[in-house]
Amino acid sequence: MSGANSPEILAAYDAVRSDKDESNWLIISYASPTGNALSLTATGTGGLEELASKLDESQAQYAYVRVEYANDTESKRVKFVLVIWIGEGTKVMRKARVSIESGEVKKVLGHHSIQVDARDKGDLEEKEIVIRLRKAGGADYNGGRG
């Protein structure tokens, strides 16, 4: 068992999903260089930009983030994004196992509109993520331009 459903991870997930909590992201990392044990390693309130700054270039990590955006002056959307991060320095065997091991994480962090497979912090630019969320949500009031 990887520990993806540990009380700490579940509590952080609930906090990110809650309208009453300021937390809007979490990061789950492998507890050691080998094995599949996972642990909560960071949470924050600074959105995608702060989340991206906390990802480790030498690791595979999983992140969950709340993204809020407006379609027009009358509506605000709240969507959730699952990030599967594989940093440039991630060891080959870890990279190979992420596709298998991410399944358990997806079960625990199950409510998300899109999944972003990120290899570079530039993959997590808010403007691009919002465009993807709008397309996934069906209504696109800006013609796909964000």
Image: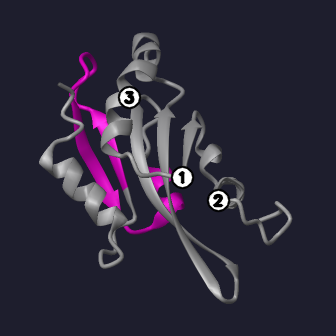
Which of the marked residues, 2 or 3, is nearer the chain's N terminus?
3
User: Do tag 3 and tag 1 residues touch (Cβ < 8 Å)?
Assistant: no
User: Do tag 1 and tag 2 residues touch (Cβ < 8 Å)?
Assistant: yes
Image x and y of residue 133, in percent? 64, 57
Q: CA distance from mark 1 to mark 2?
A: 8 Å
Which of the marked residues, 1 or 2, is nearer the chain's N terminus?
1
Q: Which residue shows up at 47% across the image and 51% down it?
A: 112
Q: Nearer the viewer, mark 2 or mark 3?
A: 2
Q: Is residue 129 magenta?
A: no
Which residue type carries mark 2?
Gly
Residue 14, quarter of picture = bottom left
Which of the marked residues, 3 or 1, is nearer the chain's N terminus?
3
Q: CA distance from mark 2 to mark 3?
A: 23 Å
Residue placed most toward the observer, 69 or 138: 138
- For mark 3, what is the residue? 103
Q: Which residue shows up at 24% across the image and 37% down it?
A: 4
Tell me the SS state at disc 2. helix
- For mark 2, what is the residue? 137
Image x and y of residue 118, in percent? 57, 37
For label 1, the crowd category at 10 Å Cα-Cα, with few meaning under 14, some 14 to 19 and many 20 or more, is some
Image x and y of residue 146, in percent? 77, 65
> Above or below — where is 5 with respect to 24?
above
For label 3, the crowd category at 10 Å Cα-Cα, with few meaning under 14, some 14 to 19 and many 20 or more, is few
Tell me the SS state at disc 3. helix
Q: Which residue shows up at 46% across the image and 18% down it?
A: 95
| Residue 113: image tag | 1
